[in-house]
Image (cartoon, grey):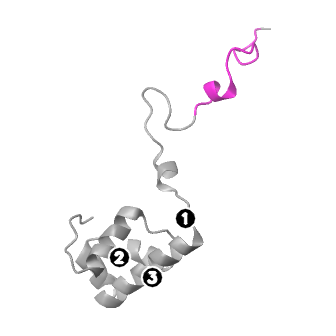
Amino acid sequence: MKLTAYEQGKKTPAELFPAPGSGPNAKPCPHINRRFNLSGEEKQRRRKVLAKALKKAGSISALSTAIGFRPMVIRNWDMAKHAIPDERLAVLERYLAGEVPHEAH
């Protein structure tokens, strides 16, 4: 019976099963990089910024036209299905300040 490198003690489990996005030619896993944890206060603050932006725009479709995001993305933020990422929050804050957002997605 032939033993594997792990069974011989030459490799650790981390070497045998590398994490997604590690290694010389690996690409980062998009689902792992997209997830982030926020405190409850930060989630509330971000939801308040979105609520102010929605109030200023009048509707989800008007806000999506003004800042360049799809209406479904804004709807998911409004229903708290997804957290608002930092770069998108910056666009909302610029919209509230009266500045034209530089990035339209």
Q: Position of residue 101 (x, y in %)?
A: 22, 70
Secondary structure under tag 2 reads helix
Q: Identify which residue, 102 or 24, lies in the foreground.
A: 102
Q: Main secondary structure of the magenta part?
A: loop
| Magenta extent | 2-18
In percent of the image, x 58 and y 72: which residue is there?
Answer: 40
Say which of marks 2 and 3 sits in front. Answer: 3
* Circle nearer the N terminus (2, 3): 3
Vertical arrangement, residue 99 with respect to residue 24, above or below: below
Which residue has dot 3 on it? 48
In percent of the image, x 52 and y 49: which residue is there?
Answer: 32
Q: Quadrant of the N terminus?
A: top right
Estimate the spatial distance between the alpha carbons at disc 3 and disc 1, rounded to whole Å: 15 Å
* Residue type indicated by callout 3: Lys
Q: Identify which residue, 45 or 51, lies in the foreground.
A: 45
Magenta-drawn stretch contains 29: no
- Corner quadrant of residue 52: bottom left
Vertical arrangement, residue 62 with respect to residue 5, above or below: below
* Circle nearer the N terminus (2, 1): 1
Which residue has dot 1 on it? 38
Which residue has dot 2 on it? 71
Vertical arrangement, residue 22 with respect to residue 101, above or below: above
Estimate the spatial distance between the alpha carbons at disc 2 and disc 3, rounded to whole Å: 18 Å
